Amino acid sequence: MTTRLEKEIARARQLEASHLWRRAARQWLTVLDITPHTQEKLRDALAARRAHCITYGNLFCGDYSGIREARLIDMAEGSVV
């Protein structure tokens, strides 16, 4: 039988495999929250994994349909606001 911790770790790894870095970073935080404080080495590894996901999330954030260009397009008129 798998524990809650194992299920949450599997979910975080699944998100990483799907390249959903920011969601994976949030999931690693959930895993960190439920990990006992007595397991310091594991907690350090989880924090490093989360930092890795945050870094990748920032590197590969992509273009958000013009938001990066700091302009909005009025779809009704087709003009740039």
Image (spheres, rainbow, N blue to C red):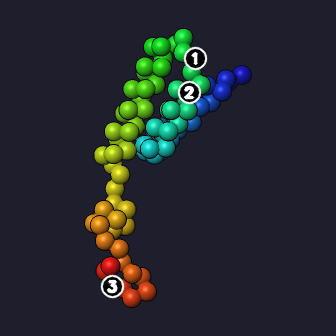
Disc 2 marks which residue? Answer: 33
Can you name the residue that lies furthest to the bottom here? 77
**Residue at (49, 43) in percent of width and height:** 23
Instruction: Tell whether label 2 touches label 3 (CB within 8 Å).
Output: no
**Residue at (43, 43) in percent of width and height:** 21
Q: Is residue 32 visible?
A: yes
**Residue at (50, 32) in percent of width and height:** 28
How packed mark 1 is, by other alpha carbons closer than 10 Å (few <14, some 14-19, many 20 or more), is few
Distance from Cα at disc 3 to Cα at disc 2: 47 Å
Kind of residue at badge 1? Pro
Position of residue 7 relative to residue 77, above or below, is above
Helix, strand or loop at disc 2?
helix
Disc 1 marks which residue? Answer: 36
Q: Position of residue 72 (x, y in %)?
A: 35, 74
Disc 3 marks which residue? Answer: 79
Q: Position of residue 14 (x, y in %)?
A: 52, 38
Q: Earlier in the sequence, mark 3 or mark 2?
A: 2
Q: Is residue 10 visible?
A: no
Distance from Cα at disc 3 to Cα at disc 1: 55 Å
Where on the picture, by quarter, is residue 22?
top left
Kind of residue at badge 2? Asp
